[in-house]
Amino acid sequence: MKDNQYSAKYALIYTSLVLVILLVPLFFYFIYMKNIHSVQNELFLKEKSLLVIKAMQEYNQNDEYFDYPRFKTFESGLYDESFQPIFSLINYKIEYFKDGYHLDNNDAYLIVKLPKGRYFNANYLIVKNKLSFAVVYEKVMIILFSVVILVFILSILFLQTFAKPYKKINEALDDFIKDSVHEINTPLSIININIDLYNRKNQPNKYLQRMKAASKVLSNIYSDMDYLIKYDRLEYKKEYISLAPFLKARIDYFTDVAKMKKITINSNIQICPKIEMNTKKLQRLIDNNISNAIKYSYENSQIDIELFMQKDSCQLSFKDYGVGIENVDEIFSRYYREDTNKGGFGIGLNIVKSIIDEAKIELKIDSILKQGTVFLYSFPPLNTLKQ
């Protein structure tokens, strides 16, 4: 994973944890702010009720009629002792007829008891408005959003700062591994070329053949390490590949390796439609399966490799008659090895798993301890099949 993606990922995780922790105090803060807002609204209604009372006090009995005050921000009305309206602008059914401030969902109203017989024979003045908590919600969301952004930015900065020394170490280690892998490939190529040149001019030598087989094993390990180093840094372009000749070439390559354990590779290869895949990834898939089949087979046994069509899908099967697999679910974990005496680094099948997941290749494994294992790969059919 790239450094920026790593920082962003864990900054997001840390921010989510902080957000979860903040939800409880934010909830109580929200309740507190709602209560404050409600108290402020109560004071507002009390202030407006005084305006109505003042208007009634200033009414001159000699006037022909009383112009009841009307306001846009609240409604009000006069009620008798039985809470029947004498004059009311309130379009709301009041449920609780008791002195004081009342809140019913978002409807708020204040009931004020009036002096008996003083204001148009009214006993109560009711002042009502709609209480909106939009301001409270807005404040809480601004606080929450600000905290999330701040924590996320600080998390990225801290992670990048703390990771700098480790990043330098990892870069140095990566450079060392890349240089080491490159240095391994050069002598391997020289060994293989010189063995081939010797065999062309002289009779086959069993010792050189063993050296050739051993160098191929090392070459396969090198290819896995090289792929592991570069797979997330390079773009592997797909192309249409004829699987049959490609598979035959890889089987021929491992024939010398199989002979070291006196293992025979039997192949039944049918013509399949071309598959769309990167050649290097396909080679890693096939090479690791053949290499593992040889590694975990008993001496003087055989390996069966088949390529055939089933419905509209290419099927590729590798069957060995060896030790079998005890923990099938674990074999794709990186660095996992069931038998440490067999060598290797435990990265081959991990690479295979990443390749088939990306290419949407299905895999079925049948294994019986001390009898053998079958790996069956089902390639997805192409929309347009190319022969």
Image (cartoon, rainbow, N blue to C red):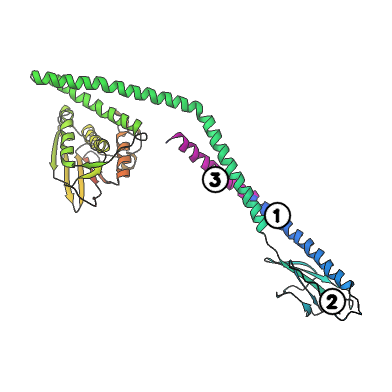
Q: CA distance from mark 3 to mark 1?
A: 24 Å
Looking at the image, is mark 2 or mark 1 earlier in the sequence? 1
Q: What residue appears at the point 24 percent right and 41 percent down from the top-left corner? A: 239
Q: Which residue is denoted by mark 1 in the rendering?
A: 33
Q: Which residue is denoted by mark 3 in the rendering?
A: 16
Q: What residue appears at the point 29 percent right and 22 percent down from the top-left corner? A: 184
Looking at the image, is mark 3 or mark 1 earlier in the sequence? 3
Mark 3 touches mark 1? (CB < 8 Å): no
Q: What residue appears at the point 19 percent right and 33 percent down from the top-left corner? A: 298
| Residue 39 image point, x, y percent | 76, 59
Q: Is residue 378 above or below residue 161?
A: below
Q: Nearer the viewer, residue 244 or 65?
A: 65
152 left or right of 96 in image: left
Question: For the magenta stretch, what is the residue range?
Answer: 2-25
| Picture quadrant of residue 217 | top left
Q: What residue appears at the point 41 percent right and 24 percent down from the top-left corner? A: 173
Q: Which residue is denoted by mark 2 in the rendering?
A: 123
The answer to if 24 sits in the magenta stretch is yes
88 left or right of 1 in image: right
| Residue 18 image point, x, y percent | 58, 44
Q: Is residue 220 above or below residue 315?
A: above
